[in-house]
Image (cartoon, rainbow, N blue to C red):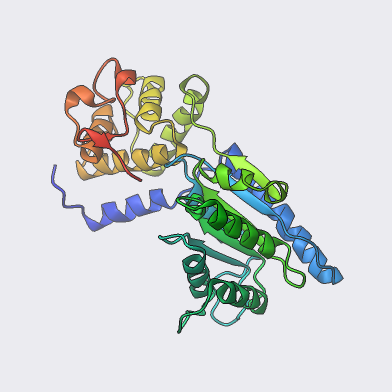
Amino acid sequence: MTDHCPRNILQRVLALRSMFSKNKTYRHFEERFRYLLDRRRAELEAGVVGEARCIALIGASGCGKTTAAEQLFSSQPDLVIDQPETSRLDVASLQVPSPATLKFVGQTTLMSLGFPLRRDRTAQTIWDMVKDHLRGRQTLFLHYDEAQDLSRHQTPKEMNAVVSTLKSLLQHKTWPVGLILTGTPELKKMINHDSQLARRVYPIEYPQLNAALDTGRVCKLLSHYAEHADLPLDSETPLPDLAQRLIHAADREFGLLIEMLVSSLEEAMTANCDMIRINHFAAMFRKRTGCIDGLNPFIVEDFERIDPRKLLGGDIQE
């Protein structure tokens, strides 16, 4: 197999990657967001200023948090997000920058609102500007991805300042803004740091896949994606066995599992095969990790002994 990929294959793979599989966690996330959005709009219509709330979507690396947030915002037909003809911006979304100092996060937030800072200001002044521009753009929600970085390496004093700033957004007297925080389990530390913040948060956590409970669901995903790729699954490979191997290879993370599934289908397309076989999954995993066949969960019998997060003998980083 060569690394050259014809254009038609790239288009087919792009179509597969654009598919989104809703799960129970995503539906809960969407329901809670719609509730808060509808409540805020009702308050605006009634001329009422009510305190905003926060949704924290928490899960391990590879579970699909970022994709879920992107899908949520893009799938709501009544949200104004990227429309140059209006200054309105219902949701401002950004990744927490590094280093995640309060000042730098404020500067980055200003940039996401379309107002890059042209000269140095204090953190307090910057956040006052953020609040002014949130109101000016009629922003209802502010989304921070990798939100756990807001609390990483912070002193107790700095942590207090971060939490106070987040609460001030929710409690603003004239234009409160809801927060969407997506992050790893470290995010819980920041939320639980302050009971006043915690009681304003709706926590939603992505559970890891369970081979005993989720094999049937993953079998359906395998069939669904294979059908869309027009590549039938090899009938000689027991589907439940393949699903359990894929769950393990993805370290039980839903988002990573979908990514690996699409990459395996791409392997079959590139090899010009008329169906997808387990050896295409093995080739995908070999490319991702550089592992020998004896450490490939799609080849060995006792695949559960393999640490799927190892890359050439070291930990895979997100």
Residue 200 in the image, given as x and y percentages of width and height: 71, 50
| Residue shown at the point (49%, 74%) measured from the top left | 111
Would residue 142 appear left or right of 17 to someone viewing this image?
A: right
| Residue shown at the point (72%, 50%) measured from the top left | 196
Residue 102 in the image, given as x and y percentages of width and height: 52, 64
Q: Can you say whether 204 is above or below 156 in the image?
A: above
Q: Can you say whether 85 is above or below 280 in the image?
A: below
Rendered image quadrant of residue 257: top left
Q: Can you say whether 173 is above or below 170 in the image?
A: below
Residue 307 in the image, given as x and y percentages of width and height: 31, 27
Residue 312 in the image, given as x and y percentages of width and height: 20, 35
| Quarter the N terminus occupies | top left
Q: Nearer the viewer, residue 287 or 153?
A: 153
How many marks overall? 0
Q: Nearer the viewer, residue 71 or 90?
A: 90
Q: Is residue 19 visible?
A: yes
Would residue 80 appear left or right of 222 to someone viewing this image?
A: right
| Residue shown at the point (60%, 37%) measured from the top left | 24
Rendered image quadrant of residue 256: top left
| Residue shown at the point (28%, 28%) measured from the top left | 278
Residue furthest to the top: 302
